[in-house]
Each structure stands twice: as C-alpha cells, then as structure tokens.
Amino acid sequence: MDSDSTVTTCYRHPKVECHVRCTRCERYICPGCMREAAVGHQCPECVKEGARSMRQARTLTGGRVSAVPVVTYVLIAVNVLVYLAELLRPEIVDRFAMVGAGLLGPDGEHYVWLHPYPGGFTPEGVVDGEWYRLLTGAFLHLPPTGGTFGILHIVMNMAVLWNLGRLVEPMLGRVHYLVLYLLSALGGSVLVLLIAPEDAVVGASGAIFGVGAAYYVMARRVGAPMAQVNRFMAGLLLWLVISAVVTSWEGHLGGLLAGGAVALVFAYVPRGGRRVLIQAAACTVLLALLLVAAAVKVSGLTSGGAPL
C-alpha cells in the first residue's frame, strides 16, 4: 500500500527522524538541535547567527559597554610595575622623566638648559629628540624618599585613578577612555614643556586630572545629580592651586584642559554613522596641535629664541 508521507530527518543528524522546522531557516531539526526562541525553536547555527547580528549596546559616547574597567586596572598595573623597576634601577627616572630641555655635564650631573651650551655639555630631554619623554614621564613616580611626597606620590595617584577610573571608563568605553587618558598625559607634558621646560617632571597626575575633567563633563551630560560632582571638582581645582607649591601645576592644568576638551567631544558629538569619525578627527587635531606646539617650543629653545 502506497503512502504519500515523506520521512524527514534532521539536517545535522541525517539518521534522526524529525518533524520540527527551525523558525529562521526552516530546516528540520531534531530534539537535540532545538533551541528555544521567542516563537518556536531555532537550530544552533541560526542562534549563533542571531547573536552575531544583534545590535551591541553602546555607551553615551559610542564606545562598547564594559562592566569591568579593564583599562583602569591595566594602567594601575603598568604604573606599579614601572615603579618596581625604578626601585631596582633608579637611573630609569633620569632616562624617561619628562624633561623639556636640560644639559648633561661632563661630570654626569644635570644642569639647567643654556643655548648655546658650553663644550663638554650635551643636551638632554625633548630638545635632544627624546620625544618619548612626553608620555613616559606620566608612568613614573617619585622614589620612596624623594621629593615632598615620596612613596605617597604613587599611592595617592593610584588611589585616585582606582576610584575615578571605575566611574569614568564605563561611561566612555575602553577605547575612548584610553585615548582620553593618553591625550591628557600628553597635554600635561606639553604644557610643562611650554612653561617650565627645565623642570624634570614625573607622575600620572596630569592624566588623572584629565580623567577628573571627563567625570565632570560626563556627569553633566547624563544629567546626574551635580552636588557631589561639583564638590569633587572644587576639591580637584583646590588641589591644583595648593599643590602648585610642591608639584607641577603645569602638568596638572595641561591634563585637565586636554581631558576636558576630549570629553566634551566624546560626549556631545551627535549620534550617527559619522560620530566615531568626528571623534577620531577631533582627537587627531588635538594631538597635532600639541605636537606642533611642542615642536615650535623646541625650535625656539634650540635656536636661542625667546620662550613662547
């Protein structure tokens, strides 16, 4: 006796008879391949494809949402590891601190910049092409018994970065946050170069001031209660003034201004397909301005011209 029924099998397991179709691709699937869906069941391949095609959540600035502030933790770890390296090899500070213009004497001592400089002396710092100092200085800190703060220098900086970073990084997204941190560090170093090129400066404070500025900008952007934020910002500005006696206020102010500028761009560029492009272009322009300002200053120092 003939029958019109057709035996259907699972497309993934041809030997298994089944009668249920995937609601997306309409291929037959066996109970072992069924995945619960909003309506009916889907096959494993369609579930994976759906997960890939789902729209990813974004921060207000367009960055990817991340619950864990990985960049903050990495930055703290890098600062601590560099500090341990300083303890083992103190000469690292002299080699990588932010120095705009200085002289290394024939006796191995460091001297104030002078141009033209006497015979036997050699230039050191950014004026000698050591441009990396504009960033490396932001990852160094005072030795345990050095300066006014000693080991408290890195302890205080990392404590503030720990507390601020865990707030700001989720607001911006990891990439945006890292860009803001580095540009803030660079902004602090460039202002040191412009105003006090003879100073040897170390510390993450400039970058942290930039993160603090971003905290203020983002809090206003999302409409957060501003009483606590305003108190924090007032304390930050007060510390900028008070610490000017014993720290590099130029580095702090430069980081604050650069971080604030970057945060404003990140927070207020309208949503749309060109948002990331506009943000990247703005950061590139800021980077170019900082480097041009540094180059002009170095040119003036090495030509004997008047300071900018």
Image: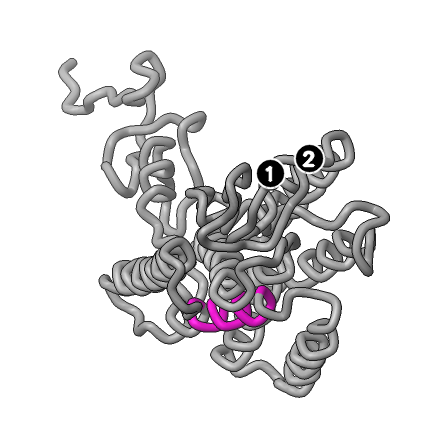
Q: Position of residue 290 (x, y in %)?
A: 39, 61
Report the side of 288 relative to 91 (left or right): left
Q: Position of residue 176 (x, y in %)?
A: 44, 57
Label 2: element kind = helix
Tell me the residue at 61%/40% (across/down). Answer: 105
**What kind of residue is marked 1?**
Arg
Label 2 CA crowd tier, 10 Å (few <14, some 14–19, many 20+): few
Q: Position of residue 144 (x, y in %)?
A: 83, 46
Residue 13 falls within the magenta-colored stretch: no
Q: Label for residue 91?
A: 2
Q: Which quadrant would residue 164 be assigned to in this image?
A: bottom right
Closer to us: 90 or 272: 90
Quarter holding the C terminus?
bottom left
Report the side of 305 relative to 171 (left or right): left
Q: Which residues are magenta?
A: 251-262
Q: Which quadrant would residue 165 be assigned to in this image?
A: bottom right
The single residue placed furthest to the front in the displayed view is 119
- Mark 1 and mark 2 in contact (Cβ < 8 Å)? yes
Tell me the residue at 48%/79% (across/down). Answer: 221
Quarter holding the N terminus?
top left
Q: Label for residue 95?
A: 1
